[in-house]
Amino acid sequence: MERAAVFDVDGTLVDTNHLHVTAWWEAFRQAGHRVPMHAVHRAVGLPSSALVAHLLGEDRDTGRDEELSAAHKALYGQYFDRLPALPDAGRLLKRLHRDGWTVVLATSAGGGELSALRRALDADEAIAATASADDVAEGKPAAEPVEHALELAGVPAERAVFVGDTVWDMRAGSRAGVRCVGVLCGGIPRTDLVEAGADAVYDDPAGLLAALPDSPLA
């Protein structure tokens, strides 16, 4: 039977979370906002509009949201030519593909950012489809990104596993009815991932690959 392995990308397969933190922190600073880096880190993984609302609150000047998002995008874009894949991320995707899994990426990235992430992974032959921010109306922690990934794979939730690094990932996967696997390489504590719905947690893609025979992706 067909089965799907759905992956978040930032912080899960490519080591970008702290680059996003730096870019968002600078975007907020340029706009006159003092937002602690630790708070930005906890919000990474949300879509841009939701991240701004989460950090600045509902009483902010919403007319400047697009300006903040554009500043973050420009600052983060400086890293596109050197985004670092996490250890064994590409090998993990290729192994799952060989084992018969349909590999789908579910990410808030789109356009040039998504292209840069895929170049970093260097595993295009293993990736069947990508559910990007451009394809859904509501991002994580809503279930829609994961549900769309399952539609692309043609696989029901009970035959899918979602791998991510944030509580937003775990909540999205849980709401979509799939088993969730967390990784610690995005910087979120194990306890937080488990409380948000992770069935199993590994250090990083290399750790998951090494433990594959005993994992939810066996």
Image: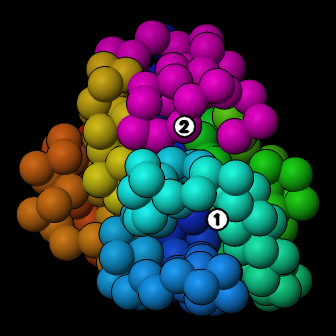
Measured in 3D between alpha carbons, the distance from the residue under mark 2 to the one under mark 1, in whole angstroms, is: 25 Å
Return the residue at label 2: 139
Q: Which sits in the foreground, 64 or 76?
A: 64
Residue 83 picture location, percent across and down: 73, 81
Please give the label number shown on residue 70. none
Residue 123 counted in the magenta span? no
Q: Is residue 150 left or right of residue 43?
A: right
Circle 2 or circle 1, nearest the eye? 2
Sequence order check, earlier mark of 2 and 1: 1
Residue 93 picture location, percent across and down: 59, 53
How dense is the environment of label 1, judged by Cα within 10 Å: few (below 14), some, or many (20 and up)? Answer: many
Helix, strand or loop at label 2? It is: loop
Return the residue at label 1: 90
Relative height, residue 196 to residue 119 (above, below): above
Residue 147 counted in the magenta span? yes
Q: Residue at x 68, y 87 (%)?
A: 30
How dense is the environment of label 2, judged by Cα within 10 Å: few (below 14), some, or many (20 and up)? Answer: many
Relative height, residue 177 to residue 49 (above, below): above
Helix, strand or loop at label 1? It is: helix
